Image (cartoon, rainbow, N blue to C red):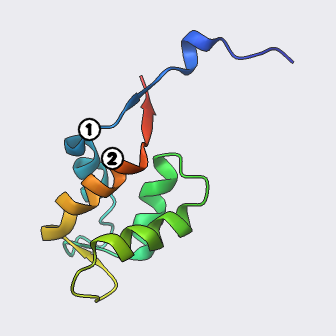
């Protein structure tokens, strides 16, 4: 049982543009909306400890019209919220 080499576990902050691409790629239905399940999968990819909870919080913070989904027009706000959460990806 060895320790991971610190050099191999470096991560970088995810940009808003990268996040937008990640979220758009998780629009499984292709309907231009992200529902809770699609967001949950996206946040799991980002390394969320509890992706379902993070998906709910993302909807709460960005779903202005309260329809339970994130539309394509709200992806920018979703990306800003996610950057504020401090997610990072492996180099």
Q: Position of residue 28 (x, y in %)?
A: 33, 67
Left or right, residue 8 beside residue 1: left
For residue 72, above or below residue 46? below
Q: Which of the 4 quarters of the picture holds residue 79?
A: bottom left
Q: Provide the residue designation for mark 1.
A: 15
Q: Which mark is residue 57?
A: none
For residue 90, above or below residue 7? below
Q: Position of residue 90 (x, y in %)?
A: 46, 28
Going 34% across and 85% down the picture, which residue do you hit?
68
Left or right, residue 75 beside residue 51: left
Q: Position of residue 45 (x, y in %)?
A: 47, 48
Viewer-proximal residue among 8 and 12: 12
Counting residues from the N terminus, which is met first, the one under dot 1 or under dot 2?
Answer: 1
Going 82% across and 14% down the picture, which residue do you hit?
2
Q: Provide the secondary structure element on which disc 1 rests.
A: loop
**Image marks 1 and 2: residues in contact by CB distance under 8 Å:** yes
What quarter of the picture does the C terminus occupy? top left
Give the tally of numbered discs: 2
What is the distance, in whole Å, between disc 1 and disc 2 at their CAs? 7 Å
Going 28% across and 71% down the picture, which residue do you hit?
62
Mark 1: few/some/many CA within 10 Å (<14, 14-19, 20+) = some
Going 54% across and 52% down the picture, which residue do you hit?
48
Q: Provide the secondary structure element on which disc 2 rests.
A: helix
Q: Which mark is residue 83?
A: 2
Left or right, residue 35 beside residue 16: right
Mark 2: few/some/many CA within 10 Å (<14, 14-19, 20+) = some
Q: Position of residue 66 (x, y in %)?
A: 28, 88
């Amino acid at each position: 049982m060895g320790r991971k080499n610190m050099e191999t576990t470096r991560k970088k902050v995810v940009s808003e543009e990268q996040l937008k691409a990640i979220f758009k790629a998780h629009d499984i239905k292709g309907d231009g909306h992200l529902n809770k399940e699609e967001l949950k999968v996206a946040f799991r990819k980002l390394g969320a400890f509890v992706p379902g909870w993070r998906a709910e919080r993302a909807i709460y913070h960005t779903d202005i019209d309260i329809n339970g989904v994130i539309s394509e027009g709200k992806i920018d706000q979703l990306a800003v919220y996610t950057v504020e959460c401090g997610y990072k990806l492996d180099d």
